[in-house]
Image: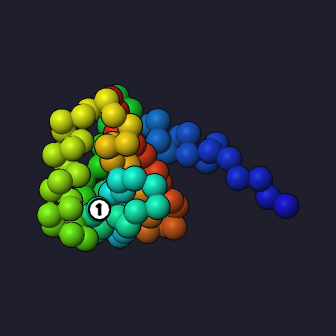
Amino acid sequence: MSVLTLSRWVDRLLRGPVTIECPHMEILGRDHEPPVFTGPGHIKIGADTKISFFMHGAPRDGSDAFRKIVQAQKNPYEILHKFRVNAVGYDGTEWSGAGRS
C-alpha cells in the first residue's frame, strides 16, 4: 500500500516560479451547481509563492455567469458568492483553490 503525501511537491512548488499547464479548468460557484466557466489554462506559482491562475474559459450560460460575477464583486466577503477553481494538470494531478477575502 502506498501513501500519498505532498512531499513530492515541496521542492517543485517552493523552488521558484512554476507554471502548471492544465488542459481542463473549471470555475465553480455554489456547491452542486454546474461550472460557471470551463476551459484550458495554467496555474502560476511565483518566486514569492503567490499562486494565481489564468484560464481561457467559456461560460456555460453567459447571463448567469455575468450575474454571478456581479454578485461576487458586490459581496466580496460573502462566502456563498465566492468562486472556486478546480483544475487537472497534464500529469493527471487535480488542483483546487478558492479566492481570498
> Relative to 29, is 56 on the left or the right?
left
In front: 87, or 16? Answer: 87
Relative height, residue 52 to residue 94 (above, below): above
Q: Position of residue 2 (x, y in %)?
A: 79, 58
Q: In the displayed structure, does residue 48 sit left or right of residue 74? A: right
Q: Position of residue 69 (x, y in %)?
A: 19, 49
Q: Quadrant of the N terminus?
A: bottom right
Q: Residue at x 50, y 59 (%)?
A: 94
State the SS at label 1. loop
Height in image: 30 above or below 99? Answer: below
In the foreground, 9 or 70: 70
Residue at 56% across, 39% down:
10
Disc 1 crowd, CA 10 A, few/some/many (<14, 14-19, 20+):
many
Q: How many marks?
A: 1
Residue under numbered circle 1: 36
Which residue is located at x 38 percent, y 67 percent? 34
Quarter where residue 21 is shown: bottom left
Question: Can residue 67 be seen in this snapshot?
Answer: yes
Name the side, left or right, on which 7 lies relative to 76.
right
Above or below, 37 against 54 in this view is: below
Q: Is residue 17 visible?
A: no
What amino acid type should be assigned to the residue bearing mark 1?
Val
Residue 29 in percent (x, y) is at 35, 53
Residue closer to the observer: 68 or 35: 68
Front residue (pair 91, 76): 76
Which image quarter is the C terminus in? top left
Residue at 26% across / 32% down in the picture?
Answer: 76
